[in-house]
Image (cartoon, rainbow, N blue to C red):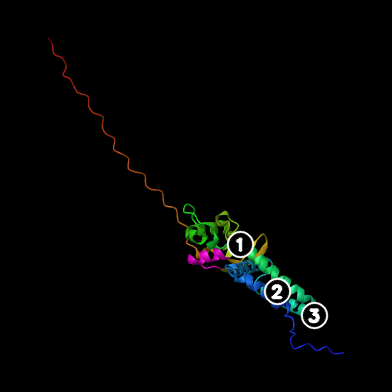
Amino acid sequence: MTIIKGSGEQASPGPLRRIGAELRPLLAVSGAGTALWAGTRILISRGWALLSDHLEGWEKWAALAFCGYAVTYTVVQHPHGARFVIPATIIGWCVAAWWISPPDPRHQATSATVAPDEPDDALTLGTLTEVVRRVAENRQGAHLADLLQQPDFKGWQQPQLKTAITRLGVPVGEFKLILGGRQRVRDGVRLRDLPPPATPDPDPAPPPSAPVEAAPRSAQHPAPGPE
């Protein structure tokens, strides 16, 4: 027996289209799309930094390629399970991105007595140089992830710190450091790209001693004569 659909019937949309239709009103809300994009960048940055703790160079790209192949193979082999796993993954990613995204400064209450938090403008070349030399010690530089552990950059995010350093004219690039017996390749700042340390001024010459004034002579009285 063959069932023929009526002319007025339409096939139900797929799960991805239904999720897109549900998320579209949320993204239309003011700032929701911007927050989702900002949170997504933070998640990708943290994931890349975590991957750099264990792999280096081409190994990271090879791991990403393998994960992409594994996901594609799993979706092809189990299409029915993927219909539920993929939408749940997308929703979970969006929720996590919105959760960690920084607040929109336009929606924050401002006060005339409290200056807004502008970490990029607060960073100076002297502060950066001091913190990098403190963290680097005898190594060639310091990674951004290690700089963020310092109290000088409390509350900063790695993309903000990288942008602030670049604005100062200091290059940021990947290089390898050995920390705790492990090699790590991350974005950081090299000591050679910072101003050299200031040389201490030589001891100033002692001021010339003041000339010693001669003691005034006592007035001489003539010896009394015979009366």
Secondary element under disc 1, as helix, strand or loop, is helix
The disc, 3 or 1, on the residue closer to the chain's N-terminal end is 3
Near mark 2 (Cα within 10 A), the count class, few <14, some 14-19 or many ≥20, is few
Secondary element under disc 3, as helix, strand or loop, is helix
Residue labelled with disc 3: 77
Tally the numbered discs: 3
Near mark 3 (Cα within 10 A), the count class, few <14, some 14-19 or many ≥20, is few
Quadrant including the N terminus = bottom right
Dominant secondary structure of the magenta stretch? helix
Residue 74 in view (yes/no): yes
Of 213 and 113, nearer the camera is: 113
User: Label 3 is placed on what type of residue?
Assistant: Gln
User: Label 2 is placed on what type of residue?
Assistant: Ala
Q: Which residues are magenta?
A: 159-172
Of 123 and 174, nearer the camera is: 123
Residue labelled with disc 2: 63
Residue at 51%, 67% in the rendered image: 166
Q: Are marks 3 and 1 in contact (CB under 8 Å)?
A: no
Secondary element under disc 2, as helix, strand or loop, is helix
The percent coordinates of residue 122 (x first, y second) are 49, 58
The disc, 2 or 3, on the residue closer to the chain's N-terminal end is 2
What's the CA distance linking mark 2 and mark 3?
21 Å
Q: Nearer the viewer, mark 2 or mark 3?
A: 3
Residue 138: quadrant of the picture:
bottom right
The percent coordinates of residue 146 (x first, y second) are 60, 60
Q: Which mark is residue 145?
A: 1
Q: Residue furthest right?
A: 1
The percent coordinates of residue 18 (x first, y second) are 70, 76
The percent coordinates of residue 91 (x first, y second) are 70, 70
Q: Which mark is residue 46?
A: none
Question: Vertical placement of 78 versus 210: above or below?
Answer: below
